[in-house]
Image: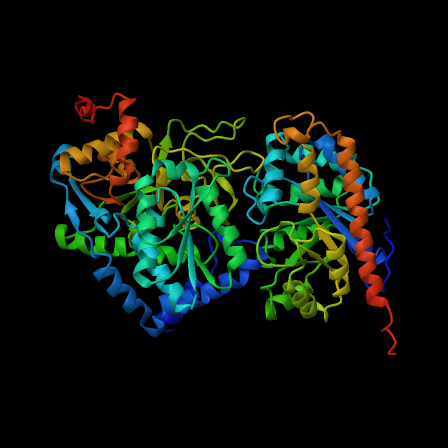
Amino acid sequence: MSTSERNRERDSESTFGDYGGQYVPEALMPALQELEDAYERYVLENEDGFLDEFRERIRDFGGRPTPLQRADRLSDRYDREIYLKREDLVHGGAHKLNNALGQVLLAKYMGKERVIAETGAGQHGTATAMAAAHLDVPCEIYMGRTDINRQRPNVYRMRMNGAEVNPVTAGSGTLKEAINETMRDWATTVERTHYVIGSVVGPHPFPKLVRDFQSVIGREAREQIRDRAGRLPDSVVACAGGGSNTMGAFHEFVPDEDVDLVAVEAGGSSLEIDEAAGLAPNSATLSTGTDGVLHGAMTKLLQQRDGQIVESHSVSAGLDYAGVGPELAHLVETGRVTPVTVDDEAALNGFHRLSNLEGIIPALESSHALGYLEEAHEELGDLVVVNVSGRGDKDLETVLEETENRDLAAAPDVEVFDQ
Amino acid sequence: MSHESTTDAAIESDVEAAIRENHPALITYITAGDPSLEETKAYVEALDRGGSDLIELGLPFSEPIAEGPTIQAAINRALDAGTTPRGFFELVDDLETEAPLLVMTYYNMILQFGGEPDVRPFVERAAEVGLSGIIVPDLPAEEADPLREACDDHGIDLVFIVAPTTEGERLDRIMSQVSGFAYVQARLGTTGARANVSTATHDSLARLSEYDVPKAVGFGVSEGDHAAEIIEAGADGVIVGSALVDIIAEHGSADSGTESQNTAEHADGDAAAELEAKAAELKRGARRGAADEDAPEPEQP
């Protein structure tokens, strides 16, 4: 059996253990079949040189490979070797471009006239808008009203790159509602539109497709740590919302059983679900969720006992989602990935600490991974890779506001600005 | 309702019998709990009096990705009013209608009913309260085996949707598994009342004409004239939802107050009367379509 035949066999499955599948309206099923076919031909088989073009563009336009940087002061602080995978240095400021560029290019190869996408923090919307401008494809982005208000710089960036931004006012106006609205658009225009889904979520084959475009993170990191340290790390730490930087960082390490894979979720202000109000003051789906079907896949969810999806919360808009990728749910279920949580405050401290000690302002998403490093570095071994999934410029307003309300050990005195 | 079989084949279901015996059939939809379960009871009875041959009741789910703005708003009103699956089943248990009842809901609601992810407790309860069928907009045939098996065990129809994009081998496979009727989606997109009948409807019905199963067309049907046109084009039934939900929304609720304030003074009786009248108009339209269909070609002068 050839490699490509093995790839086909391995990837024709629509599930990961009990998770995954295709729970979508009938109108979308032929489009998923078409996408599966395109995934197999272009991504797995490199038909028409798709992968060659993708690699060239993600290098020249995207700025890959990103460095694996030794964090000297964190290494001193924790008395072990800490390396940072610098996805904040990808064009656009986050790992999101890896996937967006891959999918918009794939849409072009498939002959689609238009791409749509949903966005939470705005990073995926920005990356999709950039990729669409770069590849000359019309682009519309759905974004919750609440997220538009808390992530304004990204809204401007999307508009500057020529994308339409459609506000979604339903529910709490965050990522979950934006996904619903994008699915509706897709169900109406499916014959000419590709939906650039923003994480390793949704119906098959999206979780695999997005994972494959993101797995460049772990592939590079694996080679780089071997070059630098002469061995594989004891652990890889990444934040987890939907799970795309997580799966991207972990995928290549999954067969390396000696490498611990730690997914850091947003613990928000509490891990309890308020059943009466239908609210979870966290986004800790892997740690506290239960099995169910949302947005096209069987996965772990934050839901009420009767099946209604609850509103999640995180100080980081990018982690604020009630679902998670089905493959990640499977890896947690089988014990390969360990889910942990870090609350809003620890994440904010992580944000300030990295900014202060290393001169890197991380995204609030990545700050959760850095928060966990502070809390549990002794359990992570001597050689640790932390994925810095994005940069934090977009989060400055939120961080200033949230810092003002708290007494944070790692925060600088910001009152000087007001004098 | 009849349990008699009209063919020599296996025992025909309530749902299929309702369509075949009342041809052309009117299938109506409203969301349970909009604006309250008590009002839903009155509205369902009105739709039954108005000539509905089957009635679909929506069990609200917080993420209704297949619905347009009208039904999404109804679902939000129902959830705000505290509608739960248990309350829904109590309502159905309490209803006495000529027309068989179907539940339309999303897969997660079915999966979670028993406390553990499993479809069986929902189907068992549905059978217990006398529901005749289940429609699940986010459950394509490929994922439906567990639910279909549970439904078969309890004599409940699992109705599949056929979209304008459903063609070739998939269409064959779905049509071979149809139970009750094929729900023919009139156009791409979400539910919602439209001003005219889509050309996709005619194409879909032409594509389906070779399959000997009842076909009912939904998505966008709002007027008697639409019903006539759809039946004339070869459908066995029409499905109407958003146009009925609009009537309920306009009347608001005397209890819940805030929404639709300007019309809240209407008594509930008015909404029920309007629903009954609307159902009757749609049923007349459907009959007109059937009459045209059967009418002899006009003689040439």
Q: Residue at x 86, y 73 (%)?
A: B298
Answer left or right for B155 relative to A242: right
Task: Tell me if residue B136 can be seen.
Answer: yes
Answer left or right for A363 relative to A313: left
Quadrant of the image occupied by residue B235? bottom right
Q: Position of residue A166 (x, y in %)?
A: 44, 47
Relative vertical location of residue B156 with respect to residue B164 in this rendering, above or below: above
Residue extending furthest toward the bottom = B301
Relative vertical location of residue A355 with respect to residue A28 in this rendering, above or below: above
Q: Residue at x 82, y 44 (%)?
A: B50
Answer left or right for A265 relative to A70: right
Q: Nearer the viewer, residue B3 or A35?
A: A35
Answer left or right for A231 relative to A375: left
Relative vertical location of residue B167 with respect to residue B74 in this rendering, above or below: below
Q: Residue at x 43, y 41 (%)?
A: A144
Q: Position of residue A181 (x, y in %)?
A: 49, 47
Q: Residue at x 32, y 45 (%)?
A: A156
Q: Position of residue A203 (x, y in %)?
A: 48, 54
Q: Quadrant of the C terminus of chain A?
A: top left
Q: Quadrant of the N terminus of chain A?
A: bottom left
Instruction: Tell me how many marks there are.
Output: 0
Q: Position of residue A409 (x, y in %)?
A: 21, 24
Task: Tell me if residue B93 can be seen.
Answer: no
Quadrant of the image occupied by residue A380? top left
Q: Nearer the viewer, residue A406 or A224?
A: A406
Relative vertical location of residue A391 with respect to residue B174 in this rendering, above or below: above
Q: How is the image coloured?
A: rainbow
Quadrant of the image occupied by residue A55? bottom left
Q: Nearer the viewer, residue B100 or B9?
A: B100
